[in-house]
Image (cartoon, rainbow, N blue to C red):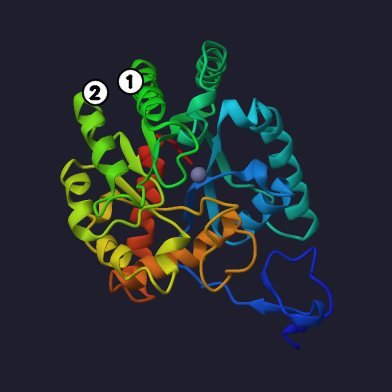
Amino acid sequence: MSDRLKLPPEHDFGFYQRRKHDAWRAVDAPTLEAPVADSHAHVHMLPDPAWELARCAANGVDFVCEICDPSEDGSRPFDSLDAWLRHASDMLASEGKDPQPPTVRIAAGVHPHNAKLYSAKIERMLLDQLQDPRVVALGEIGLDYHYDLSPRDVQRDVFRRQIRIAKEAGLPLALHLRGGQDNDVDNAHREAFEILQEEDALGPGTLLHCCSLPPDELAPWVQADCYIAYGGALTFKNADAAREGAKTVPENRLMTETDAPYMTPEPMRGAACTPAHVVFTAAVLADVRGIVPDEDRCGFLGQVHANALAFYRVGI
Ligand SMILES: [Zn+2]
């Protein structure tokens, strides 16, 4: 069979790159020895969430943590999730596959971009959402000094407030931290670390999402026993510092993620990111750690998968 197609295939669960003149090229996914988890995805932002969850299942991705920001997304992910999973199951069955969709849980929290929208009403919504048994973490929360879409003092206040809510609710924290360009050292990570220390919230209940820190800046987080998640950025050509950092994380604290629809990993860059793309990142993470495809990689991927389930306290 030629790997050049006239039209994007709608009913197979593979990966395709758009070429010139509306042609599509099939991209082989790595054949992994163990299931993979996407520990951070905005599934509701994808054009067809049910289809993408079916594609996860068909590609060995059996757990997805969906990120919901009540100030931006309202309750849409909560209202839609059951239907997505039902439809995903139907799509799998109609293609003759195991109809079991991935397990999907939700992290809810106000993103630092939206800190300026935080109000008593939004907080009440958030508290309501945390009552939902599908919620397994508070996030993504943190500081973003790269875009500065909310004033930094407001971001810090809203971050601190949500850390306290998470502690009260007994939920782990999924962090989004991105430094500004006004500083050599990543100031968002440094300030967040101080805030977490002051709030006594550093440790294995804390997850650094989309990590790209070099080893020296990552060291305090590793020493504090936090979980560290790597997404598509790990696969980028210019990400040597992040790859060096990824070598320093203990195996029982590593996680994989996508941040779909953002941060598409190589070799799929140019297409929107989907949770199933996490298989490409998982293969690179193993490679970065010097683990070759065999029994070793089975053990390594099994541990990284188990880490996501342990952090979110999910049994599959
Ligand atoms: Zn995100």
Beta carbon at label 1 within 8 Å of ligand 1? no
**Depth check: 277 or 155 in front?**
155
* Cα separation between marks 2 and 1: 9 Å
Q: Are marks 2 and 1 in contact (CB under 8 Å)?
A: yes
Report which quarter residue 289 is drawn in: bottom left
- The residue drawn where x is 65% and y is 50% is 53
Looking at the picture, which amino acid does disc 1 mark?
Lys
Please, which residue is most extreme toward the right here? Answer: 6
Residue 315 in view, yes or no: yes
In this picture, residue 156 sits left or right of residue 151 = left
How far across and down, in percent of the image, does residue 251 sit? Answer: 26, 56
How far across and down, in percent of the image, does residue 297 sit? Answer: 35, 68
| Circle 1 crowding by C-alpha within 10 Å: few under 14, some 14–19, many from 20 | some
Residue 295 in view, yes or no: no
Label 2 vs label 1, nearer the camera: 2
Q: As displayed, is residue 42 above or below residue 34?
A: above
Q: Secondary structure at mark 1?
A: helix
Looking at the picture, which amino acid does disc 2 mark?
Glu
- The residue drawn where x is 77% and y is 48% is 90
Label ID, residue 199: 2
Mark toward the start of the polypeptide (2 vs 1): 1
**Depth check: 182 or 85 in front?**
182
In this picture, residue 216 sits left or right of residue 111 = left
Q: As displayed, is residue 271 above or below residue 106?
A: below
- The residue drawn where x is 24% and y is 41% is 190
How far across and down, in percent of the image, does residue 5 sit? Answer: 79, 80
In this picture, residue 34 sits left or right of residue 211 = right
| Circle 2 crowding by C-alpha within 10 Å: few under 14, some 14–19, many from 20 | some
- The residue drawn where x is 35% and y is 73% is 287
Residue at mark 1: 167
Please, which residue is most extreme toward the front here? Answer: 182
Q: Secondary structure at mark 2?
A: loop
